[in-house]
């Protein structure tokens, strides 16, 4: 099994619903994103997937969130824009972009850092 990780970033604001504390008010973060994918085999060049391709896909997703109010964007107009939900959303978006890759590539983990000391991760629990 091969694991590849790329990082991205974006800045955005959000307000947590039903939080009962200061994070219920509008506030922003400089998010850092780490995305890890896996592949069981390599292509003829010896690559599972080109890092450039992974960075480009993650960059496109992050660009859609950059300098935006997450609460106004789907799915966060209804789904609470927590770090946990953001990690799961990013994983789903990246998986959609990687669908059909040859060799097959799976999103294994997406971790979002809302500050240097706080992160949340979505981890793919599916078995091979």
Image (cartoon, helix red, strand yellow):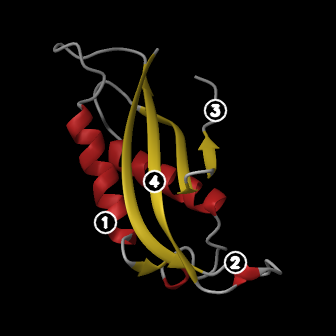
* Tag in front: 1 or 3: 1
Q: CA distance from mark 1 to mark 3?
A: 28 Å
Q: Is residue 6 above or below residue 90?
A: above
* Labels 2, 1: front one: 2
**According to the image, label 1 marks what residue?**
63
Point 65% across, 66% down: residue: 82
The disc, 2 or 1, on the residue closer to the chain's N-terminal end is 2
Give the image location of residue 10, x and y in percent: 38, 63
Gap between marks 2 and 1 measured at Cα: 24 Å
Q: Which residue is mark 4?
A: 32
| Alpha carbons under labels 4 and 1: distance apart | 12 Å
Residue visible at 54% across and 52% down? 112
**Mark 4 or mark 2, which is nearer the start of the sequence?**
2
* The C terminus, quarter of image: top right
Q: Closer to the camera: disc 4 or disc 1?
A: 4
Q: Give whichever of 42, 51 is nearer the camera.
A: 51
4 and 1 marks in contact (CB < 8 Å): no
Mark 4 vs 3, N-terminal side: 4
Residue 101, picture quadrant: top left
Reading the image, the residue beneath label 3 is 126
Contact check, label 4 and label 3, Cβ < 8 Å: no
Mark 1 Cα-neighbour bin, 10 Å: few <14, some 14–19, many ≥20: some
The residue lying at 62 percent from left, 46 percent from top is 121
- For mark 1, give the secondary structure: helix
Quickly name the residue at label 2. Answer: 23
């Amino acid at each position: 099994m091969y694991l590849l990780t790329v990082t991205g970033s974006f800045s955005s604001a959000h307000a947590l619903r039903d939080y009962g504390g200061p994070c219920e008010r509008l506030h922003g973060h400089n998010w850092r994103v780490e995305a890890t994918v896996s592949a069981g085999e390599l292509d003829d060049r010896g690559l599972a997937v080109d890092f450039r391709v992974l960075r480009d896909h993650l960059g496109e997703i992050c660009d859609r969130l950059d300098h935006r109010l997450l609460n106004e964007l789907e799915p966060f107009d209804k789904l609470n824009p927590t770090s946990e939900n953001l990690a799961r959303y990013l994983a789903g978006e990246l998986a959609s972009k990687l669908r059909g890759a040859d060799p097959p590539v799976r999103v294994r983990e997406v971790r979002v850092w809302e500050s240097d000391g706080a992160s949340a991760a979505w981890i793919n629990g599916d078995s091979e």
